[in-house]
Image (cartoon, grey):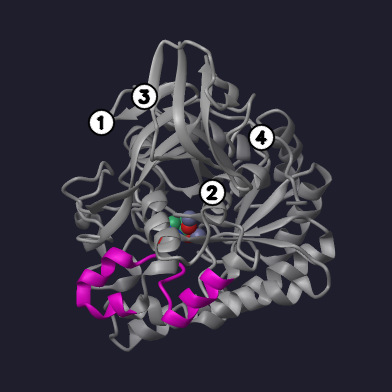
Amino acid sequence: MSLLIKNGRIITADADYVADIFIDGETIKAIGEDLPMKADKEIDAIGKFVFPGGIDPHVHLDMPFMGTFSSDNYETGTRAALFGGTTMVIDFVLQKQGNSLQAALDEWRSRSDNNCVSDYSFHMAVTDFNENTKKEIKGMVEKEGITSFKTFMAYKGALMIDDRQMVGLMEEVKQHGGLINVHATNGDMIDYLIGKHRSEGNLSPLYHYLSQPEVTEAEASERFSDMAYYTGCPGYIVHLTCEGALNAVRNATRRNQKVFVETCIQYLILDASLYEKNFDGAKWVMSPPLRQKKDQETLWAGINQGLVQVVATDHCPFKWEQKLMGKDDFSKIPNGHPAIENRMELLYSEGVHTGKFTLNKYVEVTCTNPAKIFGMFPRKGTIAPGSDADIVIFDPTEKHTLSAKTHHMNVDYSGYEGWEITGKVKTVLLRGKVAIEEGKCLLEKGYGKFIKRSKVDSKI
Ligand code: URP
Ligand code: ZN
Ligand code: ZN
């Protein structure tokens, strides 16, 4: 099957021009003005933007967490991703403490394989680093193509590792050309504050927010950066939310260190006032919590300063009945919020349309940097001959309203209900196949491929 996209405005991280794109099979074969090739299908993209497929490197699908499972499985989650212009996701495998990494990978693949509509990969979350786990790191990188290792500095008893394990893991991962991603918050301090609020009878969602003050994230981001500096291991802080934490990374640059930073769409555009809506605030109970307006300003500036390289989602949806598990106690509300389908359109509307950053920056933080950092570039993350034909055709003028009534995520509310936004994903291609057209998904589950990743590029 061949495809010709005519006269679109092609935007990559470093270019902006009008041309045709010729696709044959799964990859882009040629780009140029007035291409002479005949194709099986032609798409007129005049007046539209043509972006590389979005890459969301932080999602949790069908994940066992806090006594339940995130409500999007691999089929519904990756299909919703495609509707929103994301053609590839990176999900997290969680090692069970006491068990091997391989056992966790096998369990995760039993849920994901043959079920994805978009392409996908995994980060391996190491929750128990010991002599046995240490021996598995090399195989994960070289055999499985899993080159990033997630660590949690919070969720003690289930996911958290201590600093001794962190440093040991960093030394091992560095040797094999991998990268450590981290949920950087001070777990012990948070557990203390949760206990204190509960014992004082303060049980509403607002106290989820008050249990994770900015300092818990700033402290852990600094400590993580110090350990990465000492070991020389590339580090990537996931879902960074606030000024204090970004300043820890800024400090690290003074000794010529680079720590990669990801923020998520919600931290750029929502704030902690949502927790004042009594139990309705449970919709936005996530960790770290939403912050203040001054933190949003810091994050937008951080993107433009190059300190924040990636905007992801941390998509971890729970239906309302699952959120109700914590109706009498904020600490039992499953943490997470749905956004896999909304990231590309929201960030365009709130970032590019409002003039906060450029079109090139938009592509850089949603497509190109995730591909580079996580070892998939230039196969993914750009529009160039030889790259996978993962392409989004986007109407920058179309206005529409976000709602749970029309979204495709398997969750019965939207964190953005009624938001009026400008810019809409119209057509999506995944490896040369039309995935989304005229509001319909044309691909079946199983089309999505597991993408083995190369070693990290810490020079971006
Ligand atoms: O609230 C969140 N973020 N849920 C998913 C797990 C995590 O910490 O990323
Ligand atoms: Zn996290
Ligand atoms: Zn997460």
Residues marked 3 and 4 touching at CB (< 8 Å): no
Q: Which comes sooner in the sequence, label 3 or label 4?
A: 4
Residues marked 2 and 3 touching at CB (< 8 Å): no
**Which disc is residue 363 wearing?**
2
Amino acid type at image mark 2? Val
- Image vertical order of residue 367 relative to residue 275, above or below: above
Q: Label 3 vs label 1: CA separation?
A: 19 Å
Name the residue beneath numbered marker 1. Answer: 438
Outermost residue to the left: 405
Q: Which comes sooner in the sequence, label 3 or label 1?
A: 1
- Residue 266 shows in the view: yes
- Residue 125 shows in the view: no
* Percent coordinates x, y for residue 219 in the rendering: 63, 78
Q: Which comes sooner in the sequence, label 2 or label 3?
A: 2
**Which disc is residue 378 wearing?**
4
- Image vertical order of residue 427 relative to residue 29, above or below: below
Q: Label 2 vs label 1: CA separation?
A: 23 Å
